[in-house]
Image (cartoon, rainbow, N blue to C red):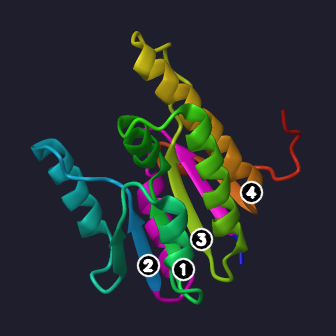
Amino acid sequence: MPLLVLLGGARSGKSRLAVVLALEAVAPVTFLATGEARDPEMEARIEAHRAERPADWAVVEEPYALTEAIAAAPSGQTLLVDCLSLWVANALEAGDPPAAIEVEAAAAANEAAARTALTIVVSNEVGLGIVPVSELGRVYRDVLGIVNRIFVDASDEAALVVAGRRLDLSPGAPRV
């Protein structure tokens, strides 16, 4: 089954689209959440996402061990990973160097691509805006861009979600 990567900006509709596509797959769903509620705003965001998805989905909360969590997902179930953006932030916060994050991303992408059931991976596209003022912001932007590319390279399908619209990224397009 395919690996589908959905990229987009904040509040672009990528998570909502991922839920719809997981429901259309008509298989049981495991939702792999990488975010942690560390403040009231994040708690509210997580609650909003919870309200968008069916209550009967299995939920795995794993902010750091992405490859292991993907490998542990039941093989016959659709897996929805939301999101790589928070996973990269968690890894950087834990002190992982960018090169190690990229190696782990490749392992996780390969694990996701090898699954027998549909895997949907959500991530933010943060490289389209201004250059971040801080070094950490620039490192984050660069590492996430590379992680997104790693996952898209491993995917069967990828799309950019803008203002709730899915823009397919052609698998046959030249890669740089």
> Which label is found at residue 30?
2
Badge 2 vs badge 1, beta-carbon distance below 8 Å: yes
Task: Answer with left or right where residue 24 lies relative to residue 39.
Answer: right
C-alpha gap between disc 3 and disc 2 = 10 Å
Q: Quadrant of residue 118?
A: bottom right
Badge 1 vs badge 3, beta-carbon distance below 8 Å: yes
Mark 2 or mark 1: whose residue is earlier in sequence: 2
C-alpha gap between disc 1 and disc 3 = 6 Å
Q: Residues within 10 Å of mark 2 (few under 14, many from 20)?
A: many
Residue 103 highlighted magenta (yes or no): no
Q: Residues within 10 Å of mark 4 (few under 14, many from 20)?
A: many
- Per the image, the residue denoted by label 4 is 154
At label 3, the amino acid type is Thr
- Per the image, the residue denoted by label 1 is 78
Badge 1 vs badge 4, beta-carbon distance below 8 Å: no
Task: Answer with left or right where residue 116 lies relative to residue 119.
Answer: right
The magenta segment is 3-28
* Residue 135 point in image, percent of width and height: 44, 14
Q: Residue at x 52, y 33 (%)?
A: 97
At label 1, the amino acid type is Thr
Mark 1 or mark 3: whose residue is earlier in sequence: 1
Asked if 143 appears above or below 65 in the picture, the reply is above
Q: Is residue 170 visible?
A: yes
Q: Nearer the viewer, residue 94 or 155?
A: 94
Mark 3 or mark 4: whose residue is earlier in sequence: 3
C-alpha gap between disc 2 and disc 1 = 6 Å
Q: Residues within 10 Å of mark 3 (few under 14, many from 20)?
A: many
Q: Residue at x 24, y 68 (%)?
A: 51
Q: Is residue 168 visible?
A: no
Asked if 16 appears above or below 130 in the picture, the reply is below
